[in-house]
């Protein structure tokens, strides 16, 4: 099969799964599109756009390619993860859907290079499309000796411009920042990221998650993905440290430690809480102990327990809106055992349904490298697995 047929079948399956949950494609607000080969980008766009032709503004989107393999060269594939919010829900809560869609070259933000909106806001939640560092006026990358700094800086400025166009939202109300890259996540890369992000000042409190993948659109070096909130309150940011004494609350800007969670592995946990939404990230550090299947399962169970503990600590009682699990390619033990681990956690079934998604609802994203970057710490923490969950604060 060619990639056009595969994309069409994938979109048909997505539509059927949404309908089974009482949703339509018009309810989709965000898609993460993962390709086996970025050379298929234009072909995928043509088919993908045909499924959203009936919409004035298609959902926001992020697109990336996994690290190439011998199989991916000959077996094209596409995976699509989406976030959907029903229209009925929005009418009941008087929340409307708004989008920012840049169709032509402008001086303030790059035009969309595919069938998507630059930003979608629904129910106060702000979801930005993946943003590469194209110069808005030329739609080209700026020539620079340091492509990471140049592209990341332009990407962040474009994000800020899009957010400003959306009811005066700004970068200081950010819940999470994912930096996708094709570069090795070494000290030079971290220093470049820190140089750019610290330009946003002390009010920007989110610790970025950096994920290395195979390729990005237009041959970009980095691509940013921002989630934020429109609210009247400035977000409260927390760092959470897992230790034998439990979970301790501290301001993100002063937390730089990584604690031993149990013999053989470490966890790092951060949470950013806004008025209506909370983002929680739990990273499991790389360790030889993870080569032992029994230790792996113990580590995964501790991650889920810590997620629930953190959720309770910050008074989150709402449902999970999005769950992403990043894991080093070739290590899919957590994926195969997810539902069993989920059922083994102590809370009631009702609590678990809100707190932890089922395996089918999780966006599983294999990566070459995954690092948690701390704004107040020189180095980053290299992870084997990162659990990233976005919650509504209220039931």
Image (cartoon, grey):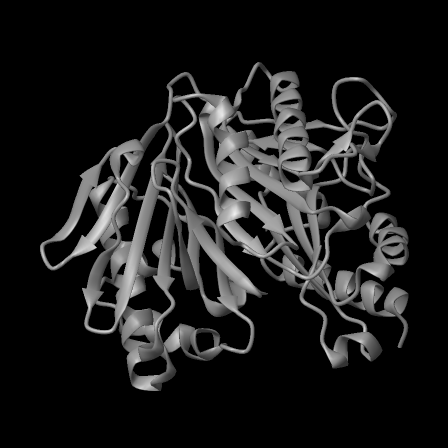
**On screen, 303 above or below 377?**
below
Quadrant assignment for the N terminus: bottom right
Quadrant for the C terminus in the image? top left
**Viewer-closest of 276 and 140:** 140
Residue at (79, 65) in percent of width and height: 37
Q: How far across and how far down the image is residue 139, in percent?
A: 84, 32
Name the foreground residue: 115 vs 95.
Answer: 115
Q: Is residue 125 left or right of residue 41?
A: left
Q: Residue furthest bottom?
A: 293
Q: Seen in the image, is 229 located left or right of residue 252? A: right
Q: Is residue 194 above or below residue 95?
A: below
Left or right placement of residue 124 versus residue 86 in this view: left
366 vs 193: above or below: below
Observer-nearest residue: 111 or 16? 111
Q: Residue furthest left?
A: 245
- Residue 24 placed where, x, y %? 69, 50
Residue in the picture at 25% in, 45% down: 240
Q: Tell me where residue 142 sits by quadrant.
A: top right
Rendered image quadrant of residue 212: bottom right
């Amino acid at each position: 099969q060619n990639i056009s047929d595969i994309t069409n079948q994938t979109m048909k399956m997505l539509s059927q799964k949404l309908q089974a949950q009482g949703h339509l494609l018009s309810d989709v607000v965000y898609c993460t599109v993962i390709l086996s080969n970025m050379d298929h980008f234009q072909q995928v766009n043509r088919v993908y756009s045909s499924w959203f032709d009936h919409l004035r503004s298609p959902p926001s989107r992020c697109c990336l390619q996994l690290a190439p393999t011998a199989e991916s060269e000959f077996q094209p594939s596409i995976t699509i993860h989406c976030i959907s919010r029903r229209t009925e829900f929005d009418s009941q809560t008087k929340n409307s859907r708004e989008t920012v869609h840049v169709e032509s070259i402008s001086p303030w933000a790059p035009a969309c290079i595919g069938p998507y909106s630059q930003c979608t806001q629904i129910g106060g939640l702000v979801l930005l499309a993946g943003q590469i560092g194209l110069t808005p006026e030329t739609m080209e990358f700026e020539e620079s000796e340091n492509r990471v700094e140049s592209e990341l800086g332009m990407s962040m400025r474009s994000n800020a411009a899009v957010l400003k166009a959306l009811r005066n939202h700004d970068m200081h109300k950010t819940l999470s920042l994912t930096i996708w890259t094709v570069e090795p996540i070494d000290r030079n890369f971290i220093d470049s990221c820190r140089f750019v992000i610290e330009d946003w000042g002390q009010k920007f409190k989110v610790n970025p998650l950096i994920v290395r993948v195979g390729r990005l659109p237009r041959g970009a070096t980095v691509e940013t993905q921002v989630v934020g909130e429109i609210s009247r309150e400035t977000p409260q940011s927390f760092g959470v440290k897992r230790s034998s004494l439990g979970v301790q609350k501290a301001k993100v800007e002063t937390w730089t430690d990584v604690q031993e969670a149990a013999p053989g592995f470490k966890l790092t946990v951060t949470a950013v809480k806004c008025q209506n939404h909370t983002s929680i990230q739990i990273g499991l550090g790389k360790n030889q102990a993870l080569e032992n299947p029994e230790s792996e399962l113990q580590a995964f169970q501790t991650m889920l327990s810590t997620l629930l503990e953190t959720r309770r600590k910050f008074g989150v009682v709402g449902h999970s809106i999005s769950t992403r699990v990043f894991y080093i390619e070739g290590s899919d033990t957590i994926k195969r055992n997810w539902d069993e681990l989920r059922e083994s956690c102590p809370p009631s079934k009702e609590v678990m349904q809100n707190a932890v998604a089922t395996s089918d609802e999780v966006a599983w994203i294999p990566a070459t490298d995954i690092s948690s970057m701390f704004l107040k710490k020189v180095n980053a923490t290299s992870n084997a697995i990162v659990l990233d969950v976005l919650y509504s604060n209220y039931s």
